[in-house]
Image (cartoon, rainbow, N blue to C red):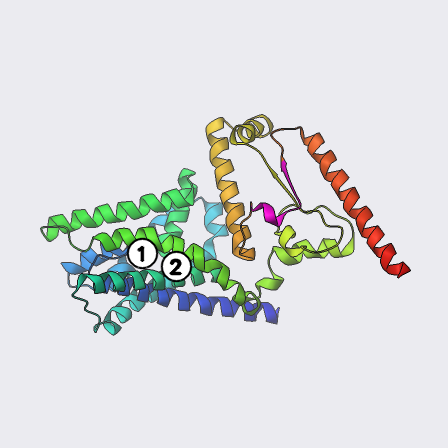
Amino acid sequence: MQKKTIFLTRRYILFIISVFINAYGIAFITKALLGTSPITSVNYVLSMFTPLTMGQWTIIVNLLFVATEPLMMSRSQLRADLRMYLIQIPVTLCFGTFIDISMSSLSWLQPEAYPMQLLSMLAGCVILACGITLEVKADVAMVAGEFFVRVLARRIGGDFGYVKLGFDVGNVILACVFSMLFIGGIHGVREGTVAAALLVGPIVHFLTPFCRVLNGVLGYSKQTGGKAAAAPADKEPCVIVGRCADFVLKGRPGVVRVFCYCDRDTAIDRCTSEYGLDKVKAEAEIKRLNKARGTHYEYYTGQRWDDPRNYDLMINTGSMTLDQACDIIVRMYGNAKAGMKAAVAGRTEA
C-alpha cells in the first residue's frame, strides 16, 4: 500500500509539471505573435479587449466547463468519475496561474522578423507537445477542456478525436467572432493557431515511446498489462487475449503470437449478426475499439499494434471460418511445443 501511494504521488507530481509545461508552451506560441493554440484562442482574444489576463480568462472559461459537465453526465457516470471531475478545479486554478506566470517570464520574447516568429511558434509547439505527452503518461487527471470533450463525446456517442477536432474548430470560430465584434478585425487567430492544431498531435505521437523510461519510476511496470500477461504464463499453459502479451512474452519458448484481422465488411457483418448492432453503429464501434487498442499497445510498448513483425502468425479471419482459424493456430502451437521439447531433449543429451 505504501509503495502504491508513493507511485501515485509521483504521478501527481509529474502531472503538475506537465500542466506547467503546457502553460509554458502555450505562452511561447502566443508570444510568437502568430496566434495561439486553438484551446486557448477564445481566452487570448478575450484578454485583448478586457482588463483580465489570458490566464484569468482560462480559469473562468474552464470553470464554466466544469459547471456544465454534470448536465451531460448521468449520476452513475458522475459517481464513477467524481475524483477526476473534482480535481479539475485545482488543476484549472493552477493552469491559469501557470499561463500568466509563463507569459510574464517570457516578456523578453518579442520576435519581430517573421522567420523568428515561426521559430518561436515551432518551439512552443514542441514544448506544448512535451507537456501533453507527460500529462498522458501521468494518467491521473485531465485539464478541464479535455475532460469536457471526453464527457461530450460520451454523451453524443462520438469518437474522442473527432469531437476534440470539432471542439477546437468551434473555439477558433468563436475567437474570430469575438475579435470581429469587439476589436474590429481578426486578431489572435493566425497561421500559428492552425500550425499548433496540426503539429502538436504528431509530435506527441513521436515523443510517446520515449516516455517508457519513466515506467519504473511511476510504477507502471507493476501495474500495467505486462504483469497481468506474464502471471498466468508463468504458472500453466494458457491463452492470453490482448494485454500486450506478445510484447511481454516475446522470446519465451513455446509461445505463439497470433494477430487476427479481417476486412471492414466482414467485421461489420460479424458485429451486426453476433451483437445486434446496426451497420452504422457497428462501423463506429469497430473504429473506436481498434483505435483504443492501437493507442494502448503503442503507449506501453512503443510499437505498432498491427505490425506483422511483432507476431508469429497473421490470420485473415475474413477468408475462412473461425473453426478453420483455430485449427491453424492449434497446429502451429503443436509444432512450437514439439520443437521446444526437442530442444530440451537435445540440451539434456548434451
**Figure quadrant of the N terminus:** bottom right
Q: Nearer the viewer, residue 238 or 181?
A: 238
Give coordinates of residue 241: x percent, y percent. Answer: 65, 45
Q: Of the residues shown, which amino acid type is indicated by label 1?
A: Asn
Residue 198 magenta-highlighted: no
Look at 34% across and 54% down and name the residue there: 199
**Figure quadrant of the C terminus:** bottom right
Disc 2 crowd, CA 10 A, few/some/many (<14, 14-19, 20+): many
Residue 9: assigned label: none
Disc 1 crowd, CA 10 A, few/some/many (<14, 14-19, 20+): many
Residue 49 falls in image quadrant: bottom left
Give coordinates of residue 259: x percent, y percent. Answer: 62, 42
Please tell me whether mark 1 sits on a helix, a strand or a loop. Answer: helix
Q: Of the residues shown, which amino acid type is indicated by label 2?
A: Gln
Residue 62: assigned label: 1
Task: Please indicate whether residue 202 sits to the left or right of residue 187 in the image.
Answer: right
Q: Which residues are magenta?
A: 307-315
Spot the residue most to the front.
350
Give coordinates of residue 105: x percent, y percent. Answer: 26, 73
Residue 88: assigned label: 2
Spot the residue most to the left.
184
Look at 40% across and 63% down and name the residue there: 130
> Disc 2 vs disc 1: Cβ atoms closer than 8 Å?
yes
Q: Nearer the viewer, residue 130 or 42?
A: 130
- Mark 2 or mark 1, which has the lower sequence index? 1
How far is mark 2 from mark 1, CA to CA? Answer: 9 Å
